[in-house]
Image (cartoon, coloured by chain):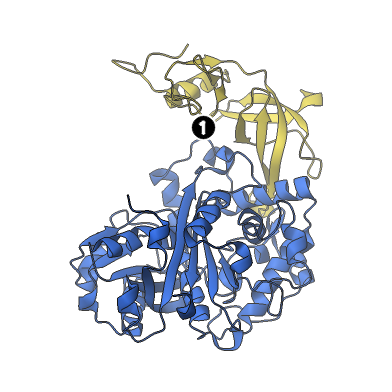
Chain colours: A yellow, B blue
Amino acid sequence: MQREMEGAAPSGPQEQYFSNLAEGRFRIQRCAACGAHQFFPRVLCMHCGAQDLAWTEPSGAGTVYSFSIVRRKPDAGGDYNVALVDLQEGVRMMSRIDGVAPGGLRIGMPVRAHVLRGEGQPLVVFVPAEVA
Amino acid sequence: MMSLESLRGQVAIAGVGHAGLGEAQGHTEMEVLAQAAARAVADAGLNMRDIDGLATCSSSATMWSMPVAEYLGLKPRYIEATMLGGSSFVSHLLPSVMALVSGQCNAVLVCYGSTQKTAVFGRKEGVKARTLLDPQPFEYPYSPLSPVTSYALAAARHMHQYGTTREQLAEVAVAARAWARLNPEAAMRDPLSIADVLASRPVSDPLTVRDCCLVSDGGGAYVMVRADRARQLKQPPVYVLGSATAVWNRQISSMEDLTVTAAAESGKRALAMAGLTVADVDVAELYDAFTINTLLFLEDLGFCKKGEGGAFVQGGAIAPGGRLPVNTNGGGLSCVHPGMYGIFLVIEAVRQLRAQAGERQVQGADIALVHGNGGTLSSQSTAILGGPATH
């Protein structure tokens, strides 16, 4: 659950989001007042302004809304993709699609969320739904 | 209450100027700004001491209006420093109109300068610094190229949703180049074909380097005064008939529909203030940071239906001799793009409406639509300008 924002709250929603990710938990906010989900996390609901937000676990199912292959020299690491993914809960986020051959990416493709924890910042990436 | 419609045509642009286009070797951004400002003031037939209103902003210095006032020796009674990225110098029009009509000030200088190409702290360093000063923690970890990947995502979605083709996007760059070839001040004047654009280096699919604006230096400025005074000055007045700005998001991932920008709102409001429709527009200057921009703005501003921008531009329709003259200086794609291009949209529209555009002059141009874009399709600002005959 999200802590109260006033008083001696030890951290804000952004820090809580990344703390969750660091523990391998992908959580998004849902507004108790209007029922809408939102991404990225905020101290108030972008739809109705209420501050009654709770962390929920998204199903992980999403659809590729758009993507771009960023061109990079092979010695700098080669090409990579940047995607926008629509989650089943009705929110969109920037991410990356792993586990798909270059040229295999399609808009509308079903994907599934995966929390990547390694060196540096934990990251939500997506993989094609059929290999998840 | 004062209505926006009552402000229509009450203020005019009386002077324009630019400096250091391309590469401003050995000059600071303040120096190219000041050169452009001096030219705009002289073009209006005024003296810098006549300027008592200032509108400016910078991609790096958050308190930029103060050093500009200091450098130019101004003590402005009106200061506008709203920073909306590239659309800023279009968005500065409406508050400046209000300041002039209310009598808060009598002559506003809108000015900008950048040396992002040649400076030691240039575009590359600026992009890097912004990851710290203007963090986007939900996008940066995925390493989108700033800003091209955001526009590439919009282009990919437009292609998916409406069947827009790479050839149609390339047509925008080809038209811009054809205009640039008529403009001795444009940076890129070699012939360019659709095949050239498609064969150029891919940057962030589906966009190639020829779908992207130039990286250049340059300063630009314009001077605004009340219309009655403008009619007494040196140049034919160019009236501000309408102006509106809209912002719906900052990040591309927060944009509700990547095929619809806030230009749909700013355009409607600016045209309503002017009491005109797009059918009245003789020339359009649309911020072409990337080829997809021009298609999106043609649709959102109402020149064609949503999804039909690609078909609209085909066959040289926005090139010289086409049905709608668009980006008549060569645009950000082929003329100049010093980080924030907005002020050059206004300068080119003024030259067209004064009939001072030389070989690229659009005959009988009375009404210009200027549209600025900022951030990653984040801020949209539209202005309707009218030539001397629209008084």
* Position of residue B279 measured from the top left corner of the image (x, y, whole percent): 63, 66
> Is A91 placed above or below B341 here?
above
Crowdedness near tag 1: few (<14), some (14–19) or many (≥20) residues, C-alpha within 10 Å: few
Q: Quadrant of residue B330?
A: bottom right
Q: In the displayed structure, does residue B181 sit left or right of residue B272?
A: right
Q: Residue at x 67, y 31 (%)?
A: A86
Q: Quadrant of residue A60?
A: top right
Marked residue chain, label 1? A
Q: Nearer the viewer, residue B213 or B163?
A: B163
Count of picture labels? 1
> Is A97 placed above or below B328 here?
above
Q: In the displayed structure, does residue B294 sit left or right of residue A31?
A: right
Q: Quadrant of residue B174?
A: bottom right
Q: Nearer the viewer, residue A45 or A110?
A: A45
* Position of residue B38 measured from the top left corner of the image (x, y, whole percent): 31, 80
Q: Nearer the viewer, residue B94 or A67?
A: B94
Q: Identify the residue under disc 1.
A: A120
User: Disc 1 on helix, strand or loop?
Assistant: loop
* Position of residue A104 measured from the top left corner of the image (x, y, whole percent): 81, 40
Can the viewer see residue A74 in this picture?
A: yes
* Position of residue B250 measured from the top left corner of the image (x, y, whole percent): 49, 44
Can the viewer see residue B86 in this picture?
A: no
Q: Residue at x 57, y 77 (%)?
A: B329
> Is B24 placed above or below A21 here?
below
Q: In the displayed structure, does residue B149 sit left or right of residue A5?
A: right
Q: Residue at x 36, y 68 (%)?
A: B10
Q: What amino acid type is highlighted by mark number 1?
A: Gly
Q: Quadrant of the C terminus of chain A?
A: top right
